[in-house]
Amino acid sequence: MEKIKVIHDMLGKTLTVWFDDPNNESVCEETSDEVVLMKNNQGKVIGFELLHYESADQVNTGINVETVIKTGTFN
């Protein structure tokens, strides 16, 4: 995974996160928690969208993102 793309649509009140190229999307599936999963043609989740998302701090229009980089194996 090289890049993660995060899109906050304040008007539509959604937060979309892509782990792969959005052009690879083949199917969308809405969960019972108002989360839409975007999948490629192999069924792998390549992104998700949170519906009815509003920032806790409406004055701040940006999104704070914490990046954690780990190397080695994961258990």
Image (cartoon, rainbow, N blue to C red):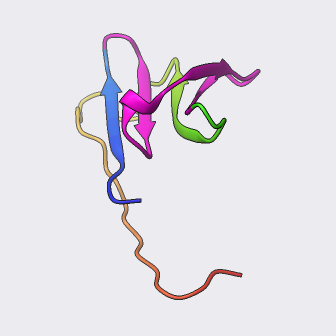
For the view shown, which residue lies furthest in the top direction? Answer: 12
Is 21 positioned to the left or the right of 39 in the image? Answer: left
Which of these two is toward me, 52 or 23? Answer: 23
Please state, as top left, top right, bottom left or bottom right, where the N terminus lies in the image.
bottom left
Place of residue 60 in the rendered image (x, y in percent of width and height, measured from the top left): 23, 36
Q: Is residue 45 above or below residue 22?
A: below
Instruction: Please tell me whether residue 6 belongs to the stretch shown in magenta.
Output: no
For the view shown, which residue lies furthest in the front direction? Answer: 41
Q: Residue at x 41, y 17 (%)?
A: 13
Q: Is residue 15 above or below residue 67?
A: above
Q: Is residue 46 above or below residue 4?
A: above
For the view shown, which residue lies furthest in the bottom direction? Answer: 72
Place of residue 27 in the rendered image (x, y in percent of width and height, measured from the top left): 59, 21
Q: Residue at x 36, y 49 (%)?
A: 4
Q: Residue at x 60, y 85 (%)?
A: 73
Q: Name which quarter of the figure residue 28 lies in.
A: top right
Place of residue 35 in the rendered image (x, y in percent of width and height, measured from the top left): 62, 26
Please state, as top left, top right, bottom left or bottom right, where the C terminus lies in the image.
bottom right
The region drawn magenta spans: 11-40
Q: Residue at x 71, y 25 (%)?
A: 33
For the view shown, which residue lies furthest in the right direction? Answer: 32
Instruction: Please tell me whether residue 34 belongs to the stretch shown in magenta.
Output: yes
Which of these two is toward me, 56 or 69? Answer: 69
Q: Name which quarter of the figure residue 18 lies in.
A: top left
Count of picture labels: 0
